[in-house]
Image: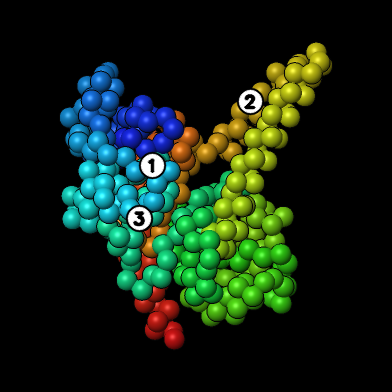
Amino acid sequence: MRIFVDAMGGDNAPQAPVEGSIEALRRFPELEISLAGDLKQVEPLLTGCDDVRQRITLVDAPEVITNNESPVMGIRTKKNSAHVIGMLQVKAGEADGFVSCGSTGATLAGGMFRLGRVPGIERPALAPILPNGKRGALLIDCGANVDCKPEYLVQFGMMGDAYLRGVMGLDQPRVGLINIGAEEEKGNALVKATYPLMEKAPYRFVGNVEARDLLSDTADVLVCDGFCGNLVLKFMEGVAGTLMGIIKKELLADTRSKIGAALAKPGFRRVKHAMDYTEIGGAPLLGVQGAVVKGHGSSNGHAVASAIAQCVKMIEGQVPRKIEEMLARAEAAD
């Protein structure tokens, strides 16, 4: 198995992608990695990895599509970028998956225009895992499609179902529609029109899910448009950061609190681990013809390794094929 890794993507590139690639290679003995970027910056970082160096192939990709430029124009004009070279290698079968912590727009545009959509899929979507104290819930979409039609949301549910079946081994993932109320008649025009379509879809639809129940294990797949999903994701990140800061401040406020904190340290460490995005890695781009994972822009080496591990699971779970099968069942039912 070979995964193409963008070495120049993210706030901590190329250090983090190189470190993450080395960690992933040590975790997966059968894995090979194509590491793409400015070789003058990448090669000096490959020290102390003689045990896995032979499984790393360097790819010269000096151009970088940044967050400050048009993703579509970047994909069209920067042919020597990791996004373009990597997507084309996956399409040609020279690589099995693609991982980047760089521009989200470039990852989406590259997936659509260089790799191609799964036949029948209207819009690919980004789907991160939200921690809920158990196995987590898949949020789809989190920003790739800010304006949606009801048919898109129905397909998001199919893609989320296929991902959890293939990657997490769930037999019947519960699919919920994010809304302002649990009742069928609640919501805006989009969710009202989507609800009856999802009831007929070939997956286990559990109805509307209110914001307060997103992390209460009421659904395994949480469906919404990208505008709503991005708000949910960014708000959760902000709340988690603020809450951890308040807890740390109060636990160090006086001697009694410090003693209690010392006794509870193992528990706090487990909580931090459960909420740590670096353990999840990134968000899969579902609906394209290949395994693509978009890592967090601020990823460190361990987060990149987790994103690569997530890509490995997507490949092994044959997620694009399962999405095609789900679409076929839906067409047969119609």
Q: How far apart are marks 2 and 3 (CA)?
A: 47 Å
Q: How crowded is mark 2: few (under 14 residues within 10 Å), some or many (20 or more)?
A: few
Secondary structure of the residue carrying numbered label 1: loop
The answer to whether residue 214 is visible is yes
Q: Residues within 10 Å of mark 1 (few under 14, many from 20)?
A: some
Q: Where is residue 242 in the image (x, y as percent from the top left)?
A: 69, 35
Identify the residue at the far top of this view: 255
Q: Residues within 10 Å of mark 3 (few under 14, many from 20)?
A: some
Identify the residue at the far bottom of this view: 334
* Numbered circle sitting on residue 153: none
Contact between labelled residues 1 and 3, with CB atoms less than 8 Å apart: no
Sequence order check, earlier mark of 2 and 1: 1
Specify the quadrant that holds the C terminus.
bottom left
Contact between labelled residues 1 and 2, with CB atoms less than 8 Å apart: no
The residue drawn where x is 39% and y is 46% is: 69
Is residue 22 rendered to the left or right of residue 186? left
Query: As shown in the figure, which amino acid type bears the numbered disc 2?
Result: Pro
* Numbered circle sitting on residue 266: 2
Q: Distance between the residues labelled 3 and 1?
A: 11 Å
User: What residue would you read off at disc 3?
Assistant: 72
User: What residue would you read off at disc 1?
Assistant: 66
Query: As shown in the figure, which amino acid type bears the numbered disc 3?
Result: Val
Q: Where is residue 168 in the image (x, y as percent from the top left)?
A: 45, 53
- Judging depth in this view, the residue of 86 and 302 nearest the camera is 86
Q: Where is residue 82 in the image (x, y as percent from the top left)?
A: 27, 43
